[in-house]
Amino acid sequence: MKALILHTVLRISLILLVTSCTKYPKDVVDDYYRKGAFNGSVIVVKEGKIVCDTALGFSSMEKNLKSDKNTSFYIASLSKSFTATAIMMLQQKGLLDYDDKASRYVELPDYAKNITIRQLLHHTSGIRDYEDLFEKKGLTNQDVIQWLFSLRNLEFPSDSQFKYSNSGYIILSQLIEKVSGVSYRTFIHREIIQPLKMGHTYVYEASTAIPNRALGYDRKKKPDDYSILTTGDGGIYSTPEDLYTFDQALRNFTLVNKDNTARMYAPSKLTNGSVSNYGFAWFVEDKHGKKTAVHTGGLSGFRALFWRDLQHNSCIIALTNQGDAFPHDHFLNDMKKTIQ
């Protein structure tokens, strides 16, 4: 009898221990916030149900202004998914083809005359990244294009390898403007932001007034705000809630049809026969029958994370304005454990 009681007590204790160690998404966010590794806003969705929607910390540390769910953060390279979506929408209207040469629409250096729209989307064009220019305040698309004209060749033959290029998405931004006849900002607002009622998402220009905008800081909480003006590769402010709206629109074919959705998550084939894991502005992983798409972003005092389980309607979106304090890989791994 005593042995049975002891066995029962041990089982209950084990169950309580396991239960107490189980973390929920909000616990993970709180842990990172307490450690000084996160200052921002998060949405976590599990199988179509929001299981975490929170904002922690300050949008302006100097003014002690707290962030809330409507605070807009600079999303850096997450903007590329908006650019790729815009290209796909133009393709659906019959205004371009992915295998068109980009030089058919925009002026490019002679060495880049034959790169295609598809190669730019896949980061396989060989166009050099403008990483050396990142520190120039007020940097514009035209500055980057002029820099490309100062070069003599591609970094590598097109489609021979994958190499991430912000410059390529700036070319796509210019292409959108040429084909649509309106500015990148106007097109994204008119065709994506406004129809989806993403009320806290903005394409940033020098004159853009963003209410409730987060300012950028480094891990020591010193100002490190966004200060360039390129579009296509970046340039967008948003909130996790608005990005979740965008996520749902992509899943429901609201913006992009089924054929283009398949293309968006299809990796590119390289000339050596290998396959890149990058589709149209998403890093794609297909393991054990589970397909996910992810993209991150980071510039100055901002970091952004957008992870999507394409089969189970789950996603993790985190935006922070204390950039280099946020270890997004560790955060994503810890967060995935709470919803899988």
Image: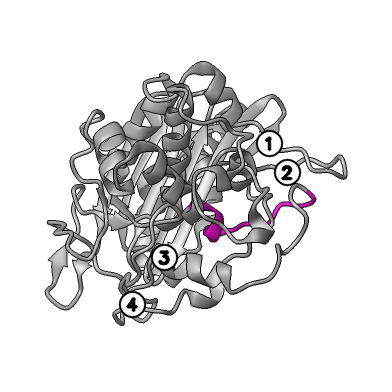
Q: Residues within 10 Å of mark 2 (few under 14, many from 20)?
A: many
Above or below, 336 against 296 in this view is above
Question: Where does label 4 land, which residue?
Answer: 224
Q: Residues within 10 Å of mark 4 (few under 14, many from 20)?
A: some
Is residue 210 visible to the viewer in this orientation of the structure? Answer: yes
Q: Secondary structure at mark 2?
A: loop
Q: Secondary structure at mark 4?
A: loop
- Which residues make up the magenta segment? 160-169
In the rendered image, the quadrant that contains the C terminus is: top right
Nearer the N terminus, badge 2 or badge 4?
4
Please, what is the three-letter code of the amino acid marked with disc 2? Answer: Ser
Question: Where does label 3 land, which residue?
Answer: 142
Q: Main secondary structure of the magenta part?
A: loop
Tag in front: 3 or 1: 3
Measure how far apart labels 2 and 4 are at the Cα level.
33 Å
Nearer the N terminus, badge 1 or badge 2?
1
